[in-house]
Image (cartoon, rainbow, N blue to C red):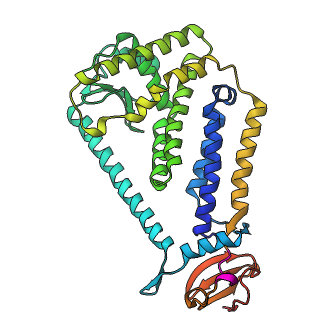
Amino acid sequence: MINYSFSTVFMTVITSTILIGIIALCFCSEKVMCSIGNKLIAVLFLFTAARLLFPIELPFSRNIIFPEPLSFLVCLIRHALYDLRGIPVSFWTVAALVWAGGIVYKLINMIIYRISFHKHIKRYGIELTDAEPYYSLLRKYNPDGPKVRVISVPGLDTPSQSCIFDCKILFPGCLDIPEEAVPYIICHELHHFRHRDCLYKLGMHILRILYWWNPLCIYLENKLDLALELRVDQQMTKEDTQLKVAYFSALADLKTHLIANRKKAPKGPSYLLTPRAFRANGDLSKRALITFHHKGTSLPLCILLASAAAIIYLCSYRFTFEPRYVLPPYRLGTPEVTSGLHAVPLPDGTYNIYLGDNLCEHVDSLEYYGDVPVEYK
């Protein structure tokens, strides 16, 4: 039986924190970043995202019981404070409602942002696709790829990309981009489109909305941006040292130019500011250092990290930390904790624990539930 409970959420938070910690260690050291490559980083992101998306307990999971002090704390969080028309209300119930409300609020904000952003592009954007040098550059770097448009957008503070299917390369309006940087921008953004990076970023942003209270998801989203930029940097420059120098020199000049002329541009709506893009550009020195020192991946290190992530991921579903819901030292004669508690056996030999008609937990045995009555259905 697949279950969702406080324990499964707790296990998800622990596992994702460990996996994000592994990713953080990879980004903290340029030497490690150069040794593992982007494919392994993508695998680590995949494990983390999959664990966050599925905070459940599977039929083959086994329970590891918390020590009694921690179990007592969990019991207090799960203990019904009062009954609302047959629905027990606890601290966990309130937290779950706040969590759900935050998801709805942030999801509405994202939808409003995207609608406003595309309305602004449609209303004020200037089509540059058929103008030079953009037309020639698109023909050169994207002869057989999906149709890509180039649009100048007033209020935008850095070159960017938009949409997954209707591909657009966005240039800041009213800011003269250095001519030598234009080919690199076009080629750079085309690489993002070929790999559907917009889709990955959207998926990560939705994951961040689902876990809006977890600051580690914000960290993960920022690091995903950096990982995607590094992949494009390495694909564009390959092993050509002169090309690397020219490429990063052009990006550095572009960054300096945009910062210097930012105040000259007309004020755009707040949703046109792209702080994550500037943070990715702010890591330009790190991107350059990693790209210049990239000498191939270390197979033993990749196998070690991938194996560790896979073991952590699988073990998080194999074992689930569970509180001991009936604690003899803390009964204190509280009828809400003990009254109505009963177990229902299942065909596979496990049990569902009910408080009244509400399912509390799924367990492998009744070892930690004392003399709880068993009801056969």
- Single out the residue that lies furthest toward the right: 300
User: Is residue 317 at least partly visible in the picture?
Assistant: yes
Q: In the figure, residue 45 lies in which quadrant?
A: top right
In depth, the one of 40 and 365 nearer the eye is 365
The image shows residue 25, relative to residue 16, as above or below, that is above
Image location (x, y in percent) of residue 138 = 40, 20
Check the picture and name the quadrant holding the N terminus. Answer: bottom right
Image location (x, y in percent) of residue 334 = 57, 88
Magenta segment, which residues? Answer: 324-330
Assess whether residue 136 is covered by the magenta stretch.
Answer: no
Residue drawn at x 62%, y 40% as measured from the top left: 23
In depth, the one of 368 and 2 nearer the eye is 368
Residue drawn at x 64%, y 37% as measured from the top left: 25
The image shows residue 158, relative to residue 310, as above or below, that is above
Image location (x, y in percent) of residue 118 = 29, 40
Q: In the figure, residue 136 lies in which quadrant?
A: top left
User: Is residue 143 at least partly visible in the picture?
Assistant: no
Q: Is residue 275 left or right of residue 290?
A: left
